Amino acid sequence: MFFGCSGRQLLDYYQACVTYYHQGFDLCNDFDEFFKNISEDLNALRGDYQQLEKVMQNRHMSVNRYCDSNTNSASNKIEGYLFKKKSKGFKTWCRRWFYLSDNQLVYRKRSNEDSFSVMEEDLRICSVRPVNEGDRRFCFEVISPTKSHILQADSADMLSLWISALQHSIGAAIQHDATHNSRPQSTSMPNALPAKRRIHWEEFLKIPGNALCCDCHSQDPRWASINLGITLCIECSGVHRSLGVHYSKVRSLTLDAWETENVKVMMELGNEVVNRIYEARVGDDCELKRPTEQCEIGVREAWIKAKYVERRFVCAMPKPQELLASETAEVLSIDSGGVADEGGSGGGSNILGKHATLPLGGTRKWAVKKLRRRRQQRSLPKTLSDDPSIYNTAKTGDELDEDDDDESINIPSMSLSISRDDLLVIGDDLGLESYETPCILGSDQESTEGESDPELPEEVPFTQLDANQLLYKASVVHNLPVMCMAFALGADKTWKNPQDRQRSFLHQAVISGSVMACEYLLLNGAAIDAVDELGYSALHISTAKGHIAQVYLLLKNKAAYDLASSDGKKALDIAVDQKNADIVTL
């Protein structure tokens, strides 16, 4: 009887549980419509929030512009008494009433006088800065190309107001002149310094390969890696940012202001050239899956890290002993699909490795090809355009022999040419001259430094062929594709040449006079304050040679201007000795 009673109670308990869960299930089904309505309401609220956020951002920008315009107009109307230091006699201080009028800085002896004197006739060519090391407080200096004036305000607040007002007036005068072209402008500016500018981003896409993302080949990239010289889609740019700036420095083609030297670097490289280097060993049997436009983020990350961080697809540099012992070299050519069209999508979209044999013969020296100006697109003969190899020989008898069964050595995917029986030229024809230069820069700003130099590149024995020597020699001839190859081969950024006065790569780029080569090295982490055996840094050498644009670039990148050489000279001392006023004022 005990077991019968317990069994009924247990059965009742099971039935109660089943009833409870059935009622819960029915209740949840009844809530489906309620939950669906809540989800729709949340989506509508999210859309309203995003729309309201855009409206508020636009209002915030409008308010800021209105406040800035009011501040500028108020500051431009500033006037008051200032102490002026006389430039003649005992250089005493006198009190005058100063104000700004018609892009001029003028003053009177008193505020109620009609006669006035003009201190500076054109504020466009002036600059203003505070004087921190003077015998009086609250002083600032107005500088023009021919003279300078020291003025003193009554307080720190008035000092800030006057400096701000002058800076706004100078900027407004320059902007008004550029917009309305009210005054004649000089047509030649040999010492003009690079400036940030907004470019027409579509011009970048005309560089071969740049119309597609360098990594996933998606259409219309809007981002770029300025130290690699490639264009990227927004998904790949996010992965590049995660690598760190020591691997990739990402900029927007449409949103960021580009400096002239960055534009030069982008023009000399491009997706096609970079992929020839970083994807030289990519074939159909590649172990990694190439990313596509719709691929998962994991596939994209794995490919980009293997390509740029591990440099897994870069051909290794052969050992000099192997080159000296071999009569031929097996080289990797690139099937780039012919010459890139005007849109830049011809190369780099389908890179397949093919092998050919380059006869070395008696070749025992190597040199780096000096970079030349890109010319307009030319139609190639069929015998050349059908050949996918990027390696060619200058001598008629040195043709590629694909049927040679002799022992051969693998050479990285660089463009090679044998210009003599004993000279191997690296970077002779990387396809840079096969398309028309985009209209990004003016003719006076294109990267043609040293192209009229008739000297042949320096010849180096095969025993000194390594990544560091390759980057060292490419820097002096400012050949950016070969410099990119050297970095991909693992060149040491802090290396110095023990056979050339302990000079660094940046020393060589400065000697070449190329701002573009200097910028490329600095973007890729070259030591900016490295010194040679005499204690001279790149800033010392550029100052001694009078290269104003290079001095400006080095100072902008925070080069140590107070670094003294072994003989105790600073870069400023060299500029003063040479009476180079342009560099001294920098």
Image: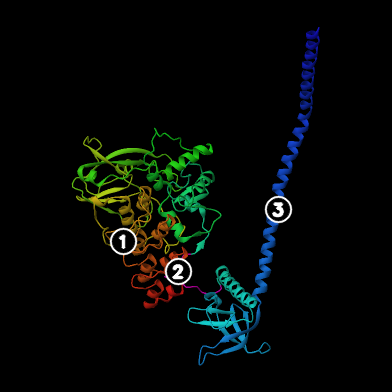
* Identity, as a three-letter code, of the amino acid under mark 1: Gln
Where disc 1 sits, the SS reads loop
| Circle nearer the N terminus (1, 3) | 3
Which is more toward the observer, 527 or 357? 527
Quarter of the figure that contains the N terminus: top right
* Mark 2 vs 3: CB contact within 8 A: no
Which is more toward the observer, 20 or 459? 20
Q: CA distance from mark 2 to mark 3?
A: 42 Å
Figure check: 334 above or below 167: above
Task: Examine the image and state in which quarter residue 9 appears.
Answer: top right
Task: Examine the image and state in which quarter residue 478 appears.
Answer: bottom left
Where disc 3 sits, the SS reads helix
In the figure, is residue 529 to the left or right of 8? left
**What residue would you read off at disc 1?**
502
Task: Examine the image and state in which quarter residue 349 appears.
Answer: top left
Which is more toward the observer, 445 or 152? 152
Residue range corresponding to the magenta coloring: 182-194
**What residue would you read off at disc 3?**
55
Q: Does the magenta run of residues contain 129? A: no
**Principal SS element in the magenta part?**
loop
Q: Is residue 303 visible?
A: yes
In the figure, is residue 155 to the left or right of 404? right
* Identity, as a three-letter code, of the amino acid under mark 3: Val
* Identity, as a three-letter code, of the amino acid under mark 2: Ala
* Mark 1 vs 3: CB contact within 8 A: no
Image disc number at residue 524: none
Residue 209 in the image: x percent, y percent?
44, 46
**What residue would you read off at disc 2?**
192
Q: CA distance from mark 1 to mark 2?
A: 32 Å
